[in-house]
Image (cartoon, rainbow, N blue to C red):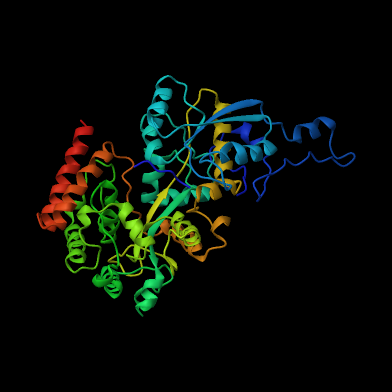
Amino acid sequence: MIRKMNSYSFKSWFVAAGVSLLMATTVGCSTDGGSSKPSPTTAPAGSASPAAAASQAPKEDPKIELTVWAAPNGTYKPGQKAGDWFKEDLLPEWNKVHPNVKVNIELIPFDGINEKVTTAIASKSAPNVFLDYPGRTLAYGQMGALASLENIIPADDLAQVKKSADMMKMVSVGGTVVTMPYYSTQLGLILDKSLWKEAGAENLLPQDEFRTWTPDQFKAALKAVANKEKGVYGLTLFALNEQGDQIYNNIISGYGVKLFNADYTKYTAGESPESEKALTFFKSLVDEGLVTPHPETLTSTNALDYWKQRKNGMVVASAAHSDIIKNGLKDGSVSGPHEYMYVNFPSTTPGQAALKSEVGFGVVFKNADAVKEEWAKKFLYWTMKDNTIFQTAMKSFNPLGKAPAWTESDPELQFLAKLATKTKEWPVIDPGWGIKGYPEMRAAMFPEIQKLFIGMSTPKQTIDTISKKFNDTIAKYNK
C-alpha cells in the first residue's frame, strides 16, 4: 500500500567517538524553525593570546552540497501541492542556519519510486538523504546501502528506541538504527460520538484515560447504535480488497497475537488459538447484525462514506480524519451533528491496547565522503527535530517527546499524540515492513475473510488457510 502521508531544537549530541569535525561545529537552536549561529565571544584583555582565542572560535560550516530525494508527502500551507513545502518552507529555514551547506531537493513521484532508488543504489548514485517511510527504505538497509544513525541520535532517545523491540522492527536493520525515529503516524478508531449520545449510550464508550476497551465492551457499544430499520450500524467491516486487512490484523493483535516471528521468516498468528477467537468475534458481529450487511462486498471507501453520512459509528482512522469532519461539515459532504472522538482498538488486556503506530521516517545513504555523510545525518536530524515545519506538514507525532504544536487546537489530536508515546510500553502492531512479498500476502488474505463472512469456512479453517498462504509466500522469497 502506497501511503501519502501528512519539526524542535538541534543539539550537537553524538554518541560515537571520533567525530571531531562535528564536535567542532556549532549549531544554533530555535523553536520556530530558524536559528542563528552564536557570534565568537571576545576574550577579556590579557585572558588569552590571539592564537588561543582563534583556536576557540567556532569553525565555519564546510562548503558542500547535499542531494535530498523526497516522496511528495504533506502540505504546510493552504493551496500547496503535496511535497512543495520541502523547497518552499523547509529549505529557507535550513539556509538561515547553514548557508554554506547547500541542499538540493528533488521530489520523486510515487510511480516507480522504488525502482528509481534501487537503480541509483546499484549505480552508486544514491542521494545523500531520502525522505520516505520505512515500508520502502528498510529494504535499502537490507541491501547494505544505509548509514547508521546511532551517532546522531541522543543517547537517551536511542536507549528508548532500543528498549522497544516493536519500534526496532520499524527503524532498524540487523540491530542498527537506520531510520530516524522521531516520526510516527498514529491510527485508531474514530467514532461519531453524537450517535451514542442520541442513543443514550455515551457511557458505553471508553472511559479511561487512554480510551481502551475489551471486545465485549466494544460489542456492547455497537449494539447500542445498530438500527437495521434506519440503516445505521456500529461499524463497517470490509473484505472486497486487501485494504481490509488493517482492522482484522489490528484486532487480532489486540487478542495478544504476534503476527510474525522476530526475523520475519514465519507468519505465527495461526499458531495461537487467540486468532481463531478473534475471527469468531468478527463473524459474530456480522451474524448479529451489528455491522453493515454483506461486508464481503464492501471496501474502505464504502466504510468512509457511511461514516460521513452517519450510517456507521466508526472507522479506522489517522489524524487526517479529523479534517475530513471539520471540512465536511462546512462544505456539506458530512452529515451533522458529528462529534468525533478517537479511541483504541479493542483488546483482551484491560487498560491496554495494541497500538497501530507506524514509526520512522528518513534515511541517509552511505557515502565515501565522510563529511557529506555526517552532514546528511545533521540535515536529517534537523529536519525531524529542530523545527516545527516537518511535523506540521506531515501531521507527525513524536513517539519520544511531547505533543507537537499542530495538535494544540484540538483535544482529540492531543489524545493521539499522547497515545503515540505509549509505544514505549504497549505492544505495537507489526506492519510487516521487513517482509519480502508482503503485498502478495495482503492480496491472499481478503478472499479468505470473504469466505468466512459468507459461511464457506470456519474461523479455524480461515486462519489455517491464511497461515499456509502467508508462509508459502515467505518461503518463496527466502529461497
Residue 225 on image: x %, y %: 30, 73
Q: Quadrant of the C terminus?
A: top left
Task: Choose between 18 and 129: the one closer to the eye.
Answer: 129
Looking at this rendering, what residue extends furthest in the front direction?
332
Residue 305 on image: x %, y %: 35, 57
Indicate whether 343 appears above or below 154.
below
Q: State which quadrant residue 28 falls in.
A: top right
Residue 383 on image: x %, y %: 57, 42
Is residue 14 in view?
Answer: no
Question: Left or right: where does residue 15 sit relative to residue 319?
Answer: right
Residue 368 on image: x %, y %: 51, 22
Looking at this rendering, what residue extends furthest in the bottom direction?
200
What residue appears at the point 59 percent right and 43 percent down from the top-left corner? 13
Looking at this rendering, what residue extends furthest in the right direction?
45
Task: Choose between 53 and 383: the one closer to the eye.
Answer: 383
Question: Left or right: where does residue 375 sit relative to residue 120?
Answer: right
Indicate whether 461 appears above or below 80.
below
Q: Quadrant of the N terminus?
A: top left
